[in-house]
Image (cartoon, grey):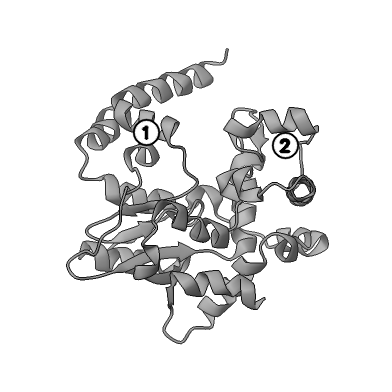
Amino acid sequence: MDGIIIRKIFFKILIRLIFLDKSIIKIIEPKDTGIFKLNKNYIVDIPKTGSSTLKHFASLNSTRYQFCIKFLKKHPMHICTTPEKNILKIEEDKKIFLFIKSPEERIFSVYKEKVMENKYNQFYSLIKINKLYFQYNKNIKFYLNKNHTFLRFCEEIINLKTKLKENNFNYTDYFDKHIISQYDLILNLKKMYPNINEFKMIVYPIEKLNYVLSKFLKKEINSKFNLTTKIKSKDYLKDIRKTNLNELVFKEDKLLYESLINSKKGYLEYSFNDFADLRKKN
């Protein structure tokens, strides 16, 4: 076995042991998303929308996290930060913040990181790991490797969602969390937080992440987030249009993002019910 892979496995096991309590929680209660706290602010954890950067700053008060950075040269922010079990008002304030990307950029960044630039020749599963039995029962293709094009990636997402619908399955129960729409991840928060409708939800574009972090932390932040998925070319948009991916999978994401970038305030202030109504109106 390649030495790099062996070291990767070793550090992965070691970090899970360091965060054993949180590792157990993630195994027992796997979640696509949740709400975590950053300096007395609630943040929605949506994959591929600055999640790593936000969790890094949320984890800085952890001694274990600081140990991993200093001695292991690792930043295990995802395992260090676990979702809040309950959400209550903070200093008389009932706000929840979240960041979103254009659906096109977000889905391509998933492909770029998980498929195209996979350094260890591992496959990327479109289906949640704990649902892999479904593939064998229904004979559904569920994985891709670096030999697959972005066009194929888009096609397989659509094919999988179609097959799930034919079998009367909710796609969010089976899709890997990175390819579930931002809109559906937000709606699914109701399952974890029944009182979420009592909160105002403040929606910012990912481009405002440093600005908002600076406000939260009361100091200037110039974090170069998402470097691993920086996109230089827009050629991927042709494949998205060719497959009609937005209309078939990310329709609400597109509507939400367009409303956001056209907002004069630079952000949206929605109730949870506003999100739920977006699908009804379209």
Residue 143 visible (yes or no) = yes
How far apart are the alpha carbons under marks 2 and 1? Answer: 26 Å
State the image coordinates of residue 84 (x, y, percent, origin top left).
32, 49
| Residue occupied by mark 1 | 25
Looking at the rendered image, the quarter that the N terminus falls into is top right
SS category of the residue bearing label 2: loop
The residue type indicated by label 1 comes to Ile
Looking at the rendered image, the quarter that the C terminus falls into is bottom right
Q: In this view, does 228 lie to the left or right of 19?
A: right
Residue 142's disc is 2
The residue type indicated by label 2 comes to Phe
Q: Nearer the viewer, residue 112 or 169?
A: 169
State the image coordinates of residue 119 (x, y, percent, origin top left).
59, 32
**Foreground tag (2 vs 1):** 1
For residue 91, which quarter of the picture?
bottom left
Q: Name the residue at 47% across, 43% down.
A: 31
